[in-house]
């Protein structure tokens, strides 16, 4: 049986008895575990439109029949790159194309791919005698067997088993007979409209995620990028959902948006566009906690940089709030500097352009949202004392994990008692996030 201590923010996988010894205090609600990316599969070759599909790193091909491809195949390259660092990737197909179809004359069967897209043209099926009795209907994808339905007698039996790949129709009473493999044809890919992608942005509000990869070309779709940026600002500033967005070659000057401006080549020769590279960056951002920086983080299986910058270009890019890849001291492809697109600091600290610092602020904000819901505490001295005690406990958690420093428990989380009245409660909170040591200066004197 499993046992030991536990982390309230993460929980445990195995059943068992877990015990923490603590001093008496108020339980603190933790923020949700990080590691979730969301992205649209624009003009994808198969799958249901308008549906969010969750892909977990522990079982990446659990949705094979819905997406028509393995995560390790080229059409799902963005998912594979995001999953190098993310625990979960939520995908959405904005538009579905025409479904591939086929017919059998004897017996009279109509077959239609479960989902639209050109991948449906790689489906085929046959009907062969079963040694024990009846017939077996086999479904193939790219000539590989993906499904077998055994011992069927009628078309009704075939319909009833419910293929995950092909929807069969016909007279339920008609008996099956043997026929050789028949291929489906006529499937076409969908073409997402601006409205389709706008629908994705709106629908994403209801999903739980950390970072969105938005692989849209800035030259052709600047309006969509503006809409995505507006959505992130709305979620962060109006809804209190601390989400991030990763775009390519799009200047937006906002801490919630990471602007990627170059890309990389994989060891197998695959060259990613800058738009495609947003998937890896989103995975790295979502997968990092608030005490981790992605500066100099190595891109797994990358062999070269597409759009390598000179020293002068790199300096200019950093000053412009651009995220890019460079070679580290071992000539590995790595993140140059883990920054977001913020470059104007009128009412914002300059440290906010560092993604590690922003993850501290976001995690702290999320913790406050979860621990101080409306109508939980009385708006009086007793309630204020309780809320301040919880706030100090949150400060302690962040201090102990190394996310903040220089905590003053007497002054860093206080209710503004003079201005709190009726149903309005005001807080004065101060935190100093810890950043990574990323610029190291040595003065070496010889003797």
Image (spheres, rainbow, N blue to C red):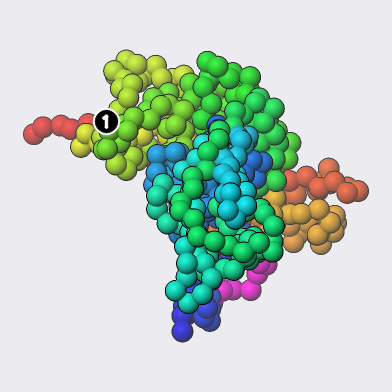
Q: Does residue 251 appear left or right of residue 413 in this picture?
A: left
Range of residues picked out in magenta? 21-27
The mark total stands at: 1
- In magenta segment, residue 266: no
For disc 1, the neighbor class at 10 Å (few under 14, some 14 to 19, many from 20) is many
Q: Position of residue 28 (x, y in %)?
A: 64, 62
User: Which residue is tagged 1?
Assistant: 304
Q: Does residue 423 appear left or right of residue 35 in this picture?
A: right
Q: Residue at x 52, y 15 (%)?
A: 219
Q: Secondary structure at mark 1?
A: strand
Residue 245 sits above or below residue 7 on the image? above
Q: Residue at x 49, y 53 (%)?
A: 125
Q: Of all residues shown, which one is farthest toward the right?
A: 422
In depth, the one of 410 and 87 nearer the eye is 87
**Does residue 263 appear anywhere in the picture?**
yes
Q: Of all residues shown, which one is farthest toward the bottom?
A: 1
Q: Quadrant of the C terminus?
A: top left
Q: Residue at x 66, y 25 (%)?
A: 194
Q: Position of residue 196 (x, y in %)?
A: 67, 31
């Amino acid at each position: 049986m499993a046992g030991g201590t536990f982390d309230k923010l993460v929980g445990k996988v195995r059943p068992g008895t877990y015990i923490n010894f603590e001093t008496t205090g108020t339980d603190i609600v933790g923020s949700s575990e990080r590691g979730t990316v969301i992205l649209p599969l624009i003009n994808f070759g198969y799958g249901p439109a308008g549906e969010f599909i969750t892909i977990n790193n522990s079982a990446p091909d659990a949705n094979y029949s819905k997406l028509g491809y393995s995560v390790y195949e080229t059409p799902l390259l963005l998912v594979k790159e995001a999953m190098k660092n993310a625990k979960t990737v939520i995908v959405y197909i904005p538009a579905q194309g025409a479904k591939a179809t086929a017919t059998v004359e004897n017996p009279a069967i109509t077959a239609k791919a479960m989902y639209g897209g050109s991948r449906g043209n790689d489906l085929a099926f046959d009907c062969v005698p079963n040694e024990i009795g009846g017939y077996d209907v086999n479904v193939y994808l790219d000539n590989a067997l993906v499904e077998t339905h055994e011992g069927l007698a009628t078309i009704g039996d075939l319909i009833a088993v419910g293929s995950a790949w092909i929807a069969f129709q016909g007279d339920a009473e008609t008996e099956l007979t043997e026929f050789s493999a028949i291929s489906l044809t006529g499937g076409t890919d969908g073409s997402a409209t601006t409205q389709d992608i706008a629908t994705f942005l709106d629908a994403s509000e209801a999903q739980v995620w950390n970072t969105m990869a938005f692989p849209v070309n800035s030259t052709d779709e600047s309006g969509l990028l503006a809409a995505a940026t507006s959505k992130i600002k709305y979620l962060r500033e109006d809804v209190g959902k601390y989400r991030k967005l990763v775009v390519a070659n799009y200047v937006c000057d906002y801490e919630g948006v990471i602007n990627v401006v170059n890309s990389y080549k994989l060891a197998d020769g695959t060259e990613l566009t800058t738009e495609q590279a947003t998937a890896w960056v989103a995975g790295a951002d979502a997968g990092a906690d608030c005490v981790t920086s992605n500066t100099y983080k190595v891109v797994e299986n990358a062999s070269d940089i597409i759009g390598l910058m000179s020293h002068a270009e790199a300096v200019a890019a950093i000053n412009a709030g651009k995220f890019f890849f460079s070679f580290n001291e071992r000539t590995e492809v790595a993140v140059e500097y883990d920054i977001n697109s913020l470059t104007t600091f009128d009412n914002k600290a300059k440290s906010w352009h560092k993604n590690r610092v922003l993850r501290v602020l976001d995690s702290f904000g999320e913790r406050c949202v979860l621990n101080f819901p409306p109508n939980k505490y009385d708006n009086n001295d007793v309630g204020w004392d309780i809320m301040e005690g919880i706030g100090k406990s949150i400060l302690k958690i962040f201090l102990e994990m190394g996310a903040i420093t220089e905590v003053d428990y007497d002054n860093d989380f206080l209710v503004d008692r003079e201005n709190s009245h009726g149903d309005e409660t005001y807080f004065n909170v101060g935190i100093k996030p810890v950043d990574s040591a990323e610029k190291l200066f040595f003065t070496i004197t010889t003797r």
